[in-house]
Image (spheres, rainbow, N blue to C red):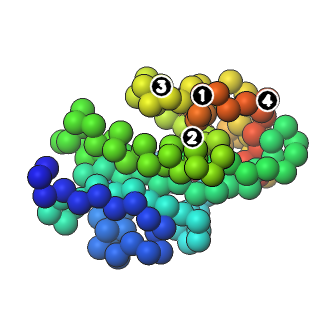
Amino acid sequence: MADALFHFDRAEALPTDVKNAAARLMALVWPPVPGMAPRRMIQREDRADRVLAVLMEEGEALATAESFVLPVLLDGNPGKILALAGVCTHPERRKLGLGRSVVLPHFARARQSGAAILFQTPVPEFYAKLGAVLFIGRVSDSTLPGTPPFWDPFPMWFPANAPQPREIDLCGPGF
């Protein structure tokens, strides 16, 4: 990994080859499932506030994560959170700290902006080591009542000491 390059910037400012490498990695980690409808997800690609962290080696992404500001309803009141999404590491390069290296800059972004981060994961222990906690409230989507917007079992919240609302309405699909 001596030749690895780290990128952390607004998506629109990153070179196209870096964004394409991140997209290829996400497709590798989360391939479409034959016969299963695609997940209903927020469109992130065109957001002006979308920030990507991408760790590259020899033209390929080893790990990536992104965040963006999301207007939501917090206990019924308009508010904003930072959404963390697309966190993944190349399957052959896991357990090397690469995921940590692409998540921590987003956590620093949240600290600097004073925003809390909401995200979902199947591996809460990984994020707990980085200072996140389980979100104990309800995550909903008022545009599709009764349908959970998150598909992974564990909603998470960062920083751990940030007050948690009882409910976050994403006012749209998950991420």
Q: Position of residue 108 (x, y in %)?
A: 50, 46
**Of 40 and 130, which appears nearest the observer?**
130
Q: Amino acid at mark 3?
A: Ala
Image mark for residue 133:
none
Tag 1 near tag 4, CB within 8 Å:
no
Q: Position of residue 142 (x, y in %)?
A: 80, 47
The single residue placed furthest to the left in the displayed view is 2
Q: Secondary structure at mark 3?
A: helix
Q: Nearer the viewer, mark 3 or mark 1?
A: 1
- Tell me what residue is drawn at x 31 percent, y 68 percent: 18
Q: Quadrant of residue 89?
A: top left
Tag 2 near tag 3, CB within 8 Å:
no
Q: Amino acid at mark 4?
A: Arg
- The residue beneath circle 1 is 160
- Tell me what residue is drawn at x 36 percent, y 52 percent: 64
Q: Is residue 22 visible?
A: no
Instruction: Say above or below: 132 vs 7.
Output: above
Q: Secondary structure at mark 4?
A: loop
Q: Amino acid at mark 1?
A: Ala
Mark sitting earlier along the chain (4/3):
3
Q: Nearer the viewer, mark 1 or mark 4?
A: 1
Q: Residues within 10 Å of mark 1 (few under 14, many from 20)?
A: some
Tag 2 near tag 4, CB within 8 Å:
no
- Tell me what residue is drawn at x 68 percent, y 55 percent: 70
Tag 3 near tag 1, CB within 8 Å:
no
Indicate left or right for 30 with 142 as reference: left
- The residue beneath circle 2 is 119
Image mark for residue 166:
4
